[in-house]
């Protein structure tokens, strides 16, 4: 028989915590195979290592050394199809008829996004959790490690060849969220009486963040100012007749998708550490009925890293050759667009901003407005609180139920600043608090135990800030089934969990107050998730 020393258990726990940092990459709502197989309705049970997460008070009713190592194999499927461009919606709403829809059909597709549903390109992820504790029937001490929060999503949304053929333009995934918040969690619990126990834990948070997203700025100088189109038409008239076609075609392209928006590539990455705590109680009301409750809170996690913003101007072969000071046609020198725009500014027909944008639009130029600037932020994490019930008055059957609240309203907005305190960007979420309710069961067939459960949880994100990398597109409805097989001092677990979410279709785009980007990405969202969990518990 394989035997593990206490030192090996602690050493393995540390190694697992390191591996969690590398692997945790999904929005997690609980830990522990047995707990998750009962739908996460475990605050009123709390009798294995996962009690450090659900309700630390439960550890004090246990005796001896116990350890657990559990793995969750996560397969997430999500998709996004952009809604009609807000520019198209605006034009057709002003003139709601078939002719209007036909006239502005070139604006219907939103910017350089693909005209079909894009799917998140995230591989199957293996996420571990682990813990070890000792109890003497009155006091208990333990240490756990798990992914407290995490999100991973990756999309290729932009058809770069149609927007900018440069090698520096978008290629491969262009929208990616990878956030990991790992919790190293020492815990203590005390049995106050035969029926009441209290527990508390300390969270040491390790955070890694990588956020990349395209910014779609409605700053197209041809669409924001109709007079700029007239300036180009006047310029075209100064050219020889046989040289006008290419530039005229380019002007048409500048007024349509995918060049209707100016696209930038933005990314932020950083790391940091923070702290938090949880507390709980477990009360045995009768010999067959008990109640448990817990509260988890985190301080804002300070994160330091770097950020870049790379502007990628559209390219058109009919426009780019004219974006010079002088154009030679049949060995005759003509005024190029750059000199023409300069002259138009001197004559008061162009402002400085439009002159600059016009001198780049169609060139395919790629330039940094920020290049690996040092930044810092305070990342808020939500509080969790819940109460659970456990009933064992039916032979071989245990019934559980939980209700919990997560305060995702903490994600209202968080500021990203340069190291000197200058505001770099504000990421607005305006998420809502969510309520989760579920029920579960455990049935003892002597040679093995069967588990089942479900929970339902409202969506935290709102339409006005919804983006493709949000993990939950709608209300989360989760069903789980599990099997536990005991063998001497070991208990083996195998669970299946599936998350159902209805598609949601968001029609309205919300532009930022500075008019430089959108708060949300309107469109059709779909998502589902399947988890396979495996675990081993050991009584040492």
Image (spheres, grey):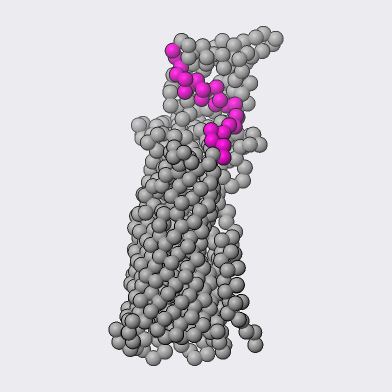
Residue that appears at 50% across and 43% down: 375
Above/below status of 8 relative to 366 = below
The vertical placement of 92 against 5, above or below, is above
Quarter-of-image position of residue 323: top right
| On-image quarter of the C terminus | bottom right
Q: Quadrant of residue 294?
A: bottom left
Q: Dividing the image into 4 quarters, which one contains the N terminus?
A: bottom right
Residue 495 appears anywhere in the view: no
With 252 as the anchor, is 61 left or right in this view?
Answer: left
- Lateral position of residue 299 relative to residue 18, left or right: left
> Any magenta on residue 19?
no
Q: Name the spot of residue 279 as percent of width and height, x first.
A: 37, 70
Given residues 427 and 524, the one toward you in this image is 427
Q: Please state the extent of the stretch shown in magenta in the rendering.
A: 348-372
In the image, what residue occupies the spot 61% across and 15% down?
325
- Whether residue 194 is situated above or below residue 401 in the rendered picture: below
User: Residue 10 at what x, y percent from top left?
Assistant: 57, 74
In this rendering, the count of numbered labels is 0
Looking at the picture, does residue 59 appear above or below residue 378? below
Q: What residue is at 60 percent from the left and 81 percent from the top?
A: 5
- Depth check: give the residue in front, 120 or 300: 300
Task: Point out the residue furthest to the right here.
Answer: 331
In this view of the protein, which residue sits in the foreground, 491 or 508? 491
Q: Which residue shows up at 45% across the image and 43% down it?
A: 416
Residue 264 x, y percent position in the rendering: 53, 37
Residue 50 appears in view:
yes
Instruction: Return the residue found at the far left.
Output: 285
Q: Position of residue 210 (x, y in %)?
A: 54, 50
């Amino acid at each position: 028989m394989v035997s593990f020393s206490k030192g090996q258990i602690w050493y393995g726990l540390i190694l697992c915590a390191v591996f969690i940092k590398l692997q945790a990459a999904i929005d997690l709502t609980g830990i522990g195979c047995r707990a998750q197989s009962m739908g996460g309705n475990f605050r009123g049970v709390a009798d294995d290592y996962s009690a450090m997460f659900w309700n630390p008070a439960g550890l004090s009713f246990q005796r001896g050394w116990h350890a657990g190592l559990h793995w969750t194999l996560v397969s997430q499927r999500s998709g996004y199809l952009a809604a009609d461009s807000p520019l198209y919606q605006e034009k057709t709403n002003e003139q709601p008829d078939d002719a209007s829809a036909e006239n502005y059909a070139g604006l219907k597709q939103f910017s350089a996004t693909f005209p079909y549903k894009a799917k998140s390109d995230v591989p199957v992820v293996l996420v571990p959790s682990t813990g070890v504790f000792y109890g003497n029937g009155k006091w208990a001490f333990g240490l756990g490690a798990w992914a407290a929060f995490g999100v991973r999503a990756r999309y290729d949304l932009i058809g770069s060849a149609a927007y900018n053929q440069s090698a520096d333009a978008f290629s491969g995934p262009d929208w990616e969220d990878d956030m990991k918040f790992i919790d190293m969690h020492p815990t203590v619990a005390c049995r106050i009486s035969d029926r009441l126990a209290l527990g508390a834990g300390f969270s040491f948070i390790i955070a890694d963040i990588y956020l990349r997203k395209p910014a779609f700025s409605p700053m197209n100088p041809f669409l924001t100012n109709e007079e700029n189109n007239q300036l180009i038409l006047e310029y075209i008239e100064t050219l020889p007749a046989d040289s006008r076609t290419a530039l005229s075609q380019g002007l048409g392209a500048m007024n349509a998708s995918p060049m209707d928006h100016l696209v930038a590539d933005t990314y932020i990455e950083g790391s940091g550490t923070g702290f938090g705590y949880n507390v709980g109680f477990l009360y045995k009301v009768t010999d067959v009925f008990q109640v448990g409750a817990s509260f988890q809170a985190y301080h804002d996690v300070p994160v330091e890293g770097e950020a870049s913003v790379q502007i990628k101007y559209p390219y058109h072969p009919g426009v780019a050759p004219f974006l010079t000071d002088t154009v030679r046609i049949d060995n005759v020198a003509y005024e190029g667009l750059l000199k023409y725009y300069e002259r138009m500014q001197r004559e008061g027909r162009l402002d400085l901003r439009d002159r600059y944008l016009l001198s780049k639009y169609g060139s395919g130029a790629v330039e940094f407005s920020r290049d690996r600037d040092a930044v810092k932020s305070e990342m808020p994490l939500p509080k969790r609180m819940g109460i659970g019930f456990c009933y064992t008055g039916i032979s071989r059957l245990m019934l559980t139920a939980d209700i919990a609240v997560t305060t995702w309203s903490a994600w209202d907005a968080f500021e990203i600043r340069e190291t000197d305190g200058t505001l770099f960007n504000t990421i607005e979420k305006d998420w809502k608090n969510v309520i989760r309710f579920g029920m579960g069961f455990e049935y003892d067939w002597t040679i093995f135990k069967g588990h089942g459960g479900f929970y339902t949880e409202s969506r935290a994100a709102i339409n006005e800030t919804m983006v493709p990398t949000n993990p939950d597109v709608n209300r989360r409805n989760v069903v789980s089934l599990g099997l536990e097989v005991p063998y001497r001092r070991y208990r083996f677990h195998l669970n299946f969990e599936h998350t159902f979410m209805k598609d949601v279709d968001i029609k309205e785009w919300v532009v930022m107050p500075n008019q430089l980007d959108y708060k949300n990405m309107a469109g059709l969202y779909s998502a589902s998730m399947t988890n396979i969990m495996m675990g081993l518990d050991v009584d040492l």
